[in-house]
Image (cartoon, rainbow, N blue to C red):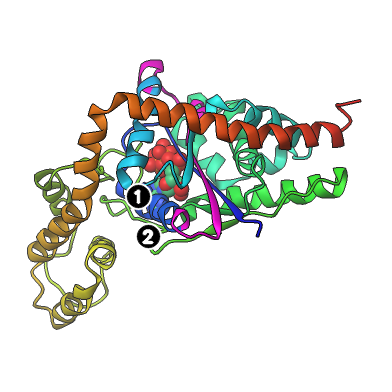
Amino acid sequence: MVKHRVLSGIRATGRLHLGNYFGAVKGMLALQNDPDYETLYMVADVHTLTTPYTIEELRKNRREVILDYLAAGLDPKKSILFQQAEVNEHIELAFYFSSVVTIAKMQHLPTFKDKVKQYPEHATMALLNYPILMAADILVYKASLVPVGIDQEPHLEVAREIARRMNQDYGTDFPEPKRFATKGEYIPSLTGEGKMSKSVEGSYINLTDDLETIRKKIRSVPTATTAGGEMPVGVKTLFAFLNLVDPGLVEKFQKTYDAGTLKFVELKDHVAEAISKELQPFQQKRKELEEDTAYVDRVIAEGAEKARAIAQKTVKEVREKMGLLS
Ligand code: AQP
């Protein structure tokens, strides 16, 4: 039986947070452990160049994300784990794809506009090309399923359009990739505004945070002074977290909220403890992996080799179909 392929990635911009974990990594794990799928998970280090970064940090983080993947339970015996920059074919295919996409289309994407607002001095061609490179990341493996958060949906739409155009114009056989959604496809920011995001200070909980840090951060979520009535955004956030880390208790806390007797500090401390408990196996495994440099080096080298073998085949096909091979 031909297995369906899965591709996902996380940018090498720093330590993973709960949004990355529930929106992406949980889905990556579920598909890795399903024998119907062949899974490829990369560190999107080339995508890191689309927003301001420091060379030293990038060098460190492109390895750190591999450690995070392994600590979260991604297993090189089941998944191909690799760094995007080690497989040049992604960039080559992205250039071919850029010939079937208009500039206007890219400029109108909400994700592009948001990032330009966030970094007005950094409205680069690389940023404009982000969704095209993402399409290449997926389609170079002919992947049909992509476990990512809901914020990535507009980019997947671009990937589907590119697949359609390439198939129509050049007779390729790219699938139209779909998003694999998890229960935590949208993790809200701790500030009560927008999504949890690495680049927004005060918005996130890192997977490496200890209980004290998590408790402090969760206590900072803005709540009303009294419970009952329409739920303010901060309270909704707390319930969203509870639903992910201790769903059995949602009903009990909801009842006390409706009755106006909920003590927010109790809910907050319970949520903090449940998050910390959820993260303990990850934190333990990460410490062990930090000691095992040789193993991590091997995972990185072997992953690149396996990914390259698949990617090279696709790019050769595309070059041929587009008239670049005689
Ligand atoms: N808040 C979120 N809820 C659910 N999923 C999320 N993801 C990110 N934030 C949330 C998912 O995590 C994966 C990696 O995203 P990325 O490669 O864009 O990583 P990032 O740039 O480091 O993510 P951030 O925190 O959002 O960074 P900035 O602040 O730089 O933009 C994706 O699957 C994404 O959907």
Q: Which residues are magenta?
A: 31-57
Q: Is residue 147 visible?
A: yes
| Element carrying mark 1 | helix
Which residue is disc 1 drawn over? Answer: 21
Which residue is disc 2 drawn over? Answer: 184
Residue under the point 81% across and 31% down: 319
Quarter occupied by the C terminus: top right
Give the mark, 1 or 2, whose residue is nearer the N terminus.
Answer: 1
Res. 91 mark: none
Q: Residues within 10 Å of mark 1 (few under 14, many from 20)?
A: many
Pick the front one: 285 or 263: 285
Q: Residue furthest right?
A: 326
Q: Is the distance from the Cβ of mark 2 to the nearest ligand 1 atom less than 8 Å?
A: yes
Q: From the viewer's perspective, is 291 left or right of 306?
A: left
Quarter occupied by the N terminus: bottom right
Q: Quadrant of residue 141?
A: top right
Q: As shown in the figure, which amino acid type bears the numbered disc 2? A: Gly
Q: Are marks 1 and 2 in contact (CB under 8 Å)?
A: yes
Ligand 1 located in image quadrant: top left
Q: Is residue 98 visible?
A: no
Pick the front one: 292 or 175: 292
